[in-house]
Amino acid sequence: MSQPTAYPGRPRTPAPGTASPELVVARLRRHARRMFLPALVLIATAGAAGYFAGNLPAPFEEWMMWAAAALVLVFLVVVPYLRWLSHTYTVTTRRVIERAGLVNRRRTDIPHARGYTISERRGPLQRLWGSGTLVLANGVDEPVRLVDIPSVRLVHETLSDQVEVSQILAHRDSHSIPIIDSDD
């Protein structure tokens, strides 16, 4: 059961005294334009390997060309793609979670109920693509940086709404009247 809200577009709040489930609002990665250069390298390497296969001069062997192409693909295409894929930001109804790292996994949480300031930074290219960087700082912990995320304005508004709703719920639950169960 949830309480109706007077503001259209605002999330419904749970009834007083009931636990609210943690729901995923958004999962984000850095903007996909980061994959433009690896995509060009992939196309160029595939084209060069296809062109030179069977056309190499006498002192070079075919396996050298394939080994070089494989090394280029691993270090300039696969590794950047895995790094991009492994760095995620998750916004839930209770917190913001940053997960990063291929080998050494790192996770940072910042709860909405504690409150935090949201700073937005956008460079010229980021403005062109509609992306930006958000810095979430609560004054106690190290700030969480959501780097180069797409639709930064929408994410900023969503985070502001989540902080507001979480603080309202925390305040309401801290001042709620306890229910006394009497068996008389």
Image (cartoon, rainbow, N blue to C red):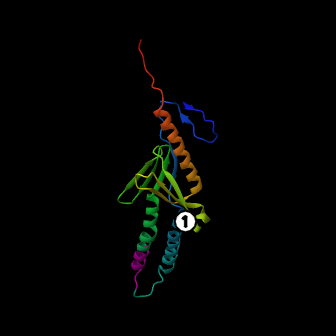
Q: Is mark 1 on a helix, strand or loop?
A: helix
Magenta-drawn stretch contains 109:
no
Is residue 66 something one can see in this rendering?
Answer: yes
Residue type beneath disc 1: Arg
Residue sitting at x 46%, y 62%? 84
Residue most extreme to the top? 184
Dominant SS in magenta: helix
Magenta-drawn stretch contains 63:
yes
Picture quarter with the N terminus:
top right
x and y percentages locating residue 130 in the rendered image: 60, 61
Q: Nearer the viewer, residue 72 or 21?
A: 21
The stretch of residues the image draws in magenta is 60-69
Residue most extreme to the left? 104
Q: Nearer the viewer, residue 98 or 184?
A: 184
x and y percentages locating residue 17 in the rendered image: 47, 30
Q: Mark 1 points at which residue?
A: 33
x and y percentages locating residue 126 in the rendered image: 57, 65
Q: How crowded is mark 1: few (under 14 residues within 10 Å), some or many (20 or more)?
A: few
x and y percentages locating residue 115 in the rendered image: 48, 47
Give the answer, above or below, for where 181 lies relative to 81. above
Residue sitting at x 39%, y 79%? 64
Give the answer, above or below, for where 2 lies relative to 104. above
Q: Nearer the viewer, residue 113 or 40?
A: 113
